[in-house]
Image (tube, rainbow, N blue to C red):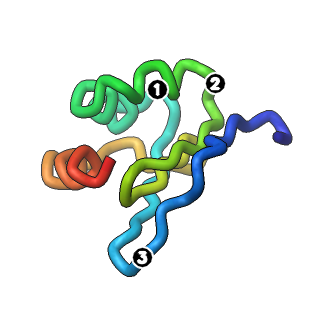
Amino acid sequence: KDGAWTDLRPAPTGKSVQTVRIKAFSKAYFDLIDAVPELRAIFAVGDKVTAQGRAITLVVSEDGKEQLSATEVKAVADKW
């Protein structure tokens, strides 16, 4: 939709749900792919992607973070 790929799985709900925005092809992008190999195929659809995990929504966009700390990467992986 509007040049972006959006996951059709329902968005996670609850108090602990988090949304993380990352920039395509940034260090954060590749760190997440390393931590959650399943994201490689999802991110491959384009540079504007919204993906729903178990307790997290990942948004790949131009205004996303370029870096995540090791703790942040682990938190995303744990919630995926």
Local packing at callout 3 (Cα closer than 10 Å; few below 14, some 14-19, many 20+) is few
Most foreground residue, 64 or 12: 12
Which sits earlier in the primary sequence, circle 3 or circle 1?
Answer: 3
Q: CA distance from mark 2 to mark 1?
A: 10 Å
- Left/right of residue 54 with respect to residue 36 in the rendered view: right
The image's mark for residue 25 is 1
- Please tell me whether mark 2 or mark 1 is closer to you in this view: 2
Gap in angstroms between the C-alphas marked 2 and 3: 28 Å
Instruction: Look at 15% across and 46% down and name the residue there.
Output: 70
Q: Residue furthest bottom?
A: 15
Q: Is residue 61 visible?
A: no
Q: Earlier in the sequence, mark 2 or mark 1?
A: 1
**Percent of width and height locating residue 74:** 17, 47
Residue 35 image position (x, y, % from top left): 22, 32
Name the residue: 55% across, 59% down. 11
In space, the residues marked 3 and 1 are separated at their CA atoms by: 30 Å
Closer to viewer: mark 3 or mark 1? 3
Q: In the image, is residue 14 above or below residue 67?
A: below
Are discs 2 and 3 less than 8 Å apart at CB? no
In the rendered image, which residue does mark 2 sit on? 46
Given this view, does label 2 or label 3 mark the residue nearer the observer?
3
- Would you name the residue on which mark 3 appears? 14
Amino acid type shown at disc 1: Phe
Q: Is residue 51 visible?
A: yes
Amino acid under label 3?
Gly
